[in-house]
Image (tube, helix red, strand yellow):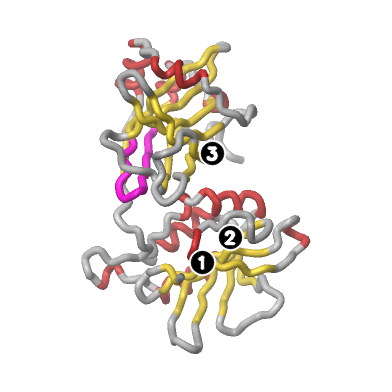
Amino acid sequence: MVPAGYFKKYVILEELDTGFGIGGAPEGFARFEGNRNGITLTLQIRRLREGTAPYTIILIYEKNNELGVLRAGSLDAGRMNGIFRRNLDYGAIHSLGMDPANIKYILIAAEHRERIFLPMVGICGRSGVWDESIRQRLLKKESGKIEKAEKENILSIENYKSTSEKPGEDQGGSDKNKIDTLSLERKLKEMFENIEPFLNPRHDYAWYKINDLAKLSNILFACNMKIPLFANPKILVGLFKYRHLIAGIYRSDRSRMNYFVLGIPAKDDSDGKPFEKICRWVGMSNPEYGDMSGYWLVYINLANGEFAS
């Protein structure tokens, strides 16, 4: 039985005000994780333009038929990516009159003296629509009580910048940062079910069914493959909708190169490429997964950690 207070919830962040993306609209997600001490809020963002000042992370929540505002901290967007993490203890949450179930919106805001821009918004409530009156609400000053509660009761803030745009990129030229291919293969075999997802099996591929993204992410990180899986909303959507991903190792007989392959299920090839131009579509059908008709595959060279285009 899961202890009271333990939960995990994901919210997709989408573009609201345009002009803040680089190479397309910014994308990202927020994750709430509850435990016995409080709630951890994590955001991962990509393709967000670096501003002259950090962005503000804002939570909008309902309390006694009114709206509450919590400015949870600042997000620096470096090299188009940003990661934010903050722990909120239950004492602080209760002092604000905030119930995690009543959080309506997560906002990434660019605040100025008389204007506020909202590059991204995550809608948590059941309404499924953005309420533009929230913007005017944010321009009003918050009460000293809320500011005091934030300063005294809420715990640590951690902000991170992306350090690499290539998974497994060796920043210092050290062998310690090379991808551990043997360990990667062993861990995939030990932790996931070996499957054959396609009708025509091939001897040069080994495939595994992935139903735990956190476990896969930890394995890749331990083997020095730094792929921001949680920062890609389309991977999360594929996993949530079809209850699995596929991952595997491809050994090319022609070039003698080895690749890590990630497959994201989708309804069809118009259903949004999770990695844009470096994806390739492979069709298949399986009644177990409803309207899914194939996978977007992305290949990563295990020798240098670069995506294969």
**CA–CA distance between discs 3 and 1?**
24 Å
Q: Is residue 308 above or below residue 10?
A: below
Q: Name the residue that disc number 2 marks.
A: 264
Q: Where is residue 146 in the image (x, y as percent from the top left)?
A: 37, 15
Q: What residue type is labelled 1?
A: Val
Looking at marks 3 and 1 on the same chain, the residue that comes earlier in the sequence is marked by: 3
Count residues near mark 1 (Cα–Cα under 10 Å), then give few for <14, some for 14-19, many for 20+.
many
Viewer-side label of 3, 1: 1
Q: What element carries label 2?
A: strand
Q: Is residue 213 above or below residue 87?
A: below
What's the residue at 34%, 18% (across, down)? 114
Compared across the picture, whether 266 is left or right of 84 comes to right
**Res. 20 in view:** yes
What's the residue at 61%, 71% (across, down)? 194
**CA–CA distance between discs 2 and 1?**
9 Å
Q: Name the residue that disc number 3 marks.
A: 11
Tag 2 and tag 1, C-beta contact below 8 Å: yes
Q: Name the residue that disc number 1 marks.
A: 298
Give the extent of the magenta segment: 75-88
